[in-house]
Image (tube, rainbow, N blue to C red):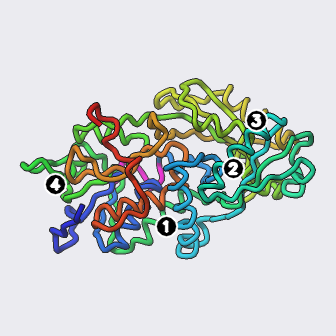
Amino acid sequence: MQCEILLPVFTRNSADVIVVGAGVIGAACAYYAARSGLRVTVLDRGPVAGGTTGAGEGNLLVSDKEPGPELELALLSTGLWRQLAEELPPDIEYEPKGGLVVAAGEAGMTALRDFAAGQRTAGVTADEVPADRLHDLEPHLTAGLAGGFHYAQDAQVMPALAAAHLLRAGGDRVRLHLGEEVTGLLIQASGAIRGVRTTAGELHSPYVVNAAGTWGGDLARLAGVELPVRPRRGFVLVTEPLPRVVRRKVYAADYVADVASGSAALQSSAVVEGTAAGPVLIGASRERVGFDRTLSPEALRRLAAQATALFPVLAGVRAMRTYVGFRPYLPDHLPAIGPDPRLPGLLHACGHEGAGIGLAPATGLAVARSLTGGEPPLDITPFRPGRFSPAA
């Protein structure tokens, strides 16, 4: 799809592309579009990183993904995040610390070996760690585990700052309109996009990118198309600042199954990681309860119990706070990326569930290439937005 630069002047009401959503996905779309020479307006009804991004742990994972389209997207993003870490300010806290996935028994280790073998064929570095070497990597890990796998490519960023700096790095080609909610899409007589209507007025552009995260389905409906994005609630516990008692991102083998599950019921499996600032982050829970932000004592109890089972040293540590977020879930666990064939000028970049921070750079680059008619950085056919239509 060729991008026609129709407007010679960057005014408040016009741009080459409008990105709806100022989370890390929208920020990455804006960043790569601006680097391609486009003038970008980014809209959000709230602040930068006010949705899923601001409630995330900053995971940049390949370890939890089986061979296939999402892993390809993650591997591309892994390299792009390394480049961005050199270009953006250091306070995005990019840390290529690696991940450690552990198994309690031999059955779990067998499953991990099979999973890692498949990942290696796709380009993942996965090294088996026998039980007697686990404490070389994580001295405070509980005793009696059967072993694990070390994933050197796993990393972490501070997601809200990463989003903010991506937007800032777009320079004069990116304009932010915060506190403006999109209330409708403007359509030409030909049936193509000509902009959006917001609570502050109209904005004009031949292209609109839906990077609205958990609300991506609502924005799609404003455009008259179906995209079944649903919220999947999760909690994170944050401890008091500590010395570096957890060196990597450490999680139990059953976390992978929870990520792939489509169950609406509460699921939890320990994901424990230290941060450069000192607090330990403890996740991860998943449940589909709409946008209910009510604190779940059961979810928090499970997280605390599973974390202390992995790291007994945490048993006497205070949890300073907890926060809740909503992952944008699509039924097939793949995001929607690229042009929507049902409405010319509409593109999607949403539905990444809990992997959006890690997958943001590759998503943004793919969207920018779609806008400018460039070669896609990978095959985005599996992420086509129209795949949920009855005729797809």
User: Magenta stretch?
Assistant: 43-50
The chief SS type of the magenta part is loop
As helix, strand or loop, the secondary structure at mark 3 comes to: helix
What x and y, as percent, mark residue 150? Answer: 76, 55
Residue placed most toward the observer, 38 or 203? 38
**Quadrant (top left, top right, bottom left, bottom right) of the N terminus:** bottom left
Q: Amino acid at mark 2?
A: Ala
As helix, strand or loop, the secondary structure at mark 2 comes to: helix
Quickly name the residue at label 4: 194
Q: CA distance from mark 2 to mark 3?
A: 31 Å
Quickly name the residue at label 2: 117
What x and y, as percent, mark residue 260? Answer: 57, 36
49 part of magenta stretch: yes
Q: In screen coordinates, is 228 left or right of 202?
A: right
Please tell me the numbered disc located at residue 127.
none
Please tell me the numbered disc located at residue 304.
3
Quickly name the residue at label 1: 165
Q: CA distance from mark 1 to mark 3?
A: 33 Å
